[in-house]
Image (cartoon, rainbow, N blue to C red):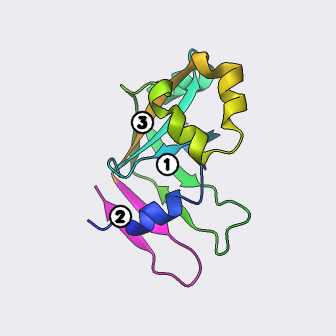
């Protein structure tokens, strides 16, 4: 599977709008995420332990997301999926911290404020639509 376009787009963004449906009621959250080439079907994100959002992740019956393009990116590259699941991750924030610090501007401030309170979730992708920007080929990857 050629994930080069997915790799290109995930280098340009670090936020997503994560849509959850619980009991036919939709909710959207903006979260930072990180992606690793050796796990192309997974986006990692965190939430404060015990927060309402964390409990919603456990209850969600339907999940979709779209990445949020950085405003300085020409062509608005993004990824999205309507075929995803959320689960608690075996990874810790300490495992992911170097990637967060590398890809999310000012993440050190977030870490300093709430780092020990964060727990890691995995967004598993059944498929992902990759739009690398205006004038470029768009693809759907199926995992």
Give the spatial CA distance, label 1 vs label 2.
20 Å
Q: Residue at x 67, y 74 (%)?
A: 74
The quarter of the displayed image where residue 100 is located: top right
Work out whether residue 57 or residue 88 is closer to the camera in this orientation and state it.
88
Mark closer to the observer (2, 3): 2
- Quarter in which the C terminus is drawn: bottom left
> Which numbered disc covers residue 64?
1
Task: Answer whether labels 1 and 3 touch (C-beta < 8 Å).
Answer: no
Name the residue carrying label 3: 122
Q: Earlier in the sequence, mark 1 or mark 2?
A: 2
Q: Earlier in the sequence, mark 1 or mark 3?
A: 1
**Dot 2 lies on which element?**
loop
Write down the region rendered in magenta. 127-143
Q: Residue at x 39, y 67 (%)?
A: 4
Q: Residue at x 69, y 23 (%)?
A: 112
Residue furthest to the bottom in view is 135
Q: Is residue 30 above or below residue 57?
A: below
Q: Residues within 10 Å of mark 3 (few under 14, many from 20)?
A: many
Give the spatial CA distance, label 2 vs label 3.
19 Å
> Which numbered disc covers residue 85?
none
Percent coordinates x, y for residue 80 in the rendering: 50, 58
């Amino acid at each position: 599977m050629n994930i080069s376009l997915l790799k290109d787009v995930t280098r340009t963004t670090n936020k997503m709008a994560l849509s959850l449906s619980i009991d036919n009621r939709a909710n959207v959250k903006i979260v930072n995420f990180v992606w690793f080439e050796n796990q192309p079907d997974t986006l990692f994100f965190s939430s404060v332990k015990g927060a309402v959002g964390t409990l919603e992740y456990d209850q969600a019956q339907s999940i979709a997301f779209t990445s949020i393009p950085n405003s300085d990116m020409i062509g608005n590259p993004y990824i999205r999926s309507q075929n995803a699941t959320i689960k608690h991750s075996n990874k810790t924030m300490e495992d992911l911290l170097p990637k967060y610090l590398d890809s999310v501007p000012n993440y050190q401030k977030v870490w300093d404020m709430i780092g020990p309170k964060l727990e890691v979730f995995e967004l598993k992708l059944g498929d992902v639509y990759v739009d690398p920007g205006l004038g470029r080929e768009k693809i759907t990857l199926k995992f």
